[in-house]
Image: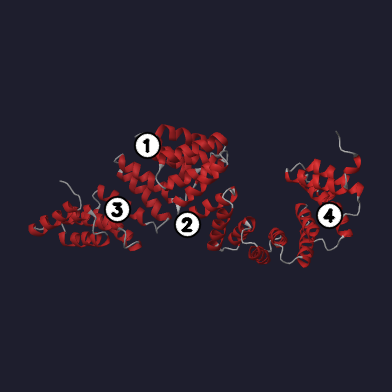
Amino acid sequence: MHASAKEYTAEYWQQKGDEFMMMQSFDIALDCYNKSIQLEGTNASAWMKKGQALSGMERYNDALSAYNESIGMDPKLAEAWYAKGLAYAHLNRLNESIAAFDEAISLHPRAPLSWYGKGIALANQGKYNESMQALDKAIELNESLAGAWYSKALISAELGMNNESLEALEKTVSLDPEHEDAWFNLGLVYANQADYTDSLLAFNNVTDLNPINALAWEKKGDALLSLSRYFESAEAFQRSLKIEPESEAAWQGSALALRLSGRYRESIDAYNKSLELDPANAASWNGKALAYAELLDYNLSLRMFDKAIEIEPEEVGFYYNKAIVLNDMENYSGAVAILRSAVALHPECAVCWNRLGLSLAKLELFSEAIKAYDKSIELDADYLDPWNNRGIAQIMGYEDYIEALKSFDMAIKIDPKCIPAWVNKSNALKLAGRDPEANDALEKAKRLGYTD
């Protein structure tokens, strides 16, 4: 038995419209509200809800017309002013959006969503301080408003308030554990603070929520790299690349993870893919050179380093890496030449001066080697290696055991657990004829783990 037509009242159609709005069936809800308005055209609430259905369909101009009808019938309907503010915001008519939110706030000053909407509109105008004030008011009225906390986090970051941003992101995910963007940004913040464990946990939450978020998989790979979990890192980059195969950054990260996990051939293939996408990526040429060096293909490695240096001639690390390969080839003169270029470009590079000293010592140019070590120490007095190497040069070049012992003692002062420095000190004492002291130093080295 069918219901009679007289039962379909304006109230009935509005109620049905509300039900379909809850299901996000906006087109059906619109039909219901239109039926309600046909029966009772002066119902401000029905016009407002018609506007909401139109907004759900992204017909914002039509929605504004409906909101204006609603407000014309009831200028004190705060919800209609709020909805109008949202529609203006979607149309990027921000001044009108803010004005509408202000009307809603004047009618209902304790409505957190109106303050929240105003805060977003102000942020979109770049008025971050005013935006923050509005968002703080929204949070004061409803501390559980996750969206307001998230917006506060983003604006705090824009204002350089990093601690506040972190706290707001943590609050966001505590209120809304399925907020993908908040977890992602939280992962980035932790990574910037070198907190890679928490960064990884945050990105894990992103990929749990959205397994096809390629960038989150890439950032997981970065975090795992920083945690020296190279095999897992390579897997994360590979997952990212299955989703987004044209990501040059993911190919480069994958190549690095593969190289550090000892999978050099696979690493070279990944570097090649990275270089197909960006032939001018000097870091990829450098990484590829290091992979070839691990495979003992030194000549090819050197050509790759030269390519990296050609692209970025100011990057001292490329010179340094090339010098290590030349040393491995026992081409100490070549290593000295490239390291002299490095320190000429970057005289503040303490590790370069130390490496130059080592290469000069291999050529038995001990006086120059000691000068290079001294320069390294001058730049970084707490850098242990040049102190240790300086002591060896004093013995090898001059049999100056007293000066050598001073250098070894400085190395030990920097790190009392440095086994090579204790062993070298023992040898210097023995050469100086101070056998009891030499034995004591050797015993110390053995207690630290040295074996003959």
Position of residue 81 measured from the top left corner of the image (x, y, whole percent): 80, 59
Do residues under tags 2 and 3 come within 8 Å of each other at their CB atoms? no
Q: Earlier in the sequence, mark 1 or mark 3?
A: 1
Residue 439 image offset from top left, x and y in percent: 10, 55
Asked if the residues shown at circle 4 and circle 3 are in contact, with their CB atoms under 8 angstroms apart, the answer is: no
Judged by depth in the image, the label closer to the viewer, 1 or 3, is 1
Residue 107's spot in the image, x, y percent? 78, 66
Which residue is denoted by mark 4 in the rendering?
45
Crowdedness near tag 1: few (<14), some (14–19) or many (≥20) residues, C-alpha within 10 Å: some
Q: CA distance from mark 1 to mark 2?
A: 28 Å
Compare marks 1 and 4 and give the one earlier in the sequence: 4
Q: Position of residue 272 (x, y in %)?
A: 49, 34
| Residue pointed to by mark 1 | 262
Q: How is the image coloured?
A: secondary structure
Residue to which mark 2 is pinned: 193
From the image, state whether disc 1 or disc 4 is nearer to you. Answer: 4
Q: CA distance from mark 1 to mark 3?
A: 29 Å
Residue type highlighted by circle 1:
Gly
Q: Quadrant of residue 262?
A: top left
Judge left or right: residue 50 versus residue 109: right
Residues at marks 2 and 4 touching, judged by CB atoms closer than 8 Å: no
CA gap between label 4 and label 3 equals: 83 Å
Between 141 and 404, the one lying in front of the other is 141
Of discs 2 and 4, which sits in the foreground? Answer: 4
Q: Amino acid at mark 4?
A: Ser
Residue located beneath label 3 in the image:
357
Label 3 packing within 10 angstroms: few (<14), some (14-19), many (20+): many
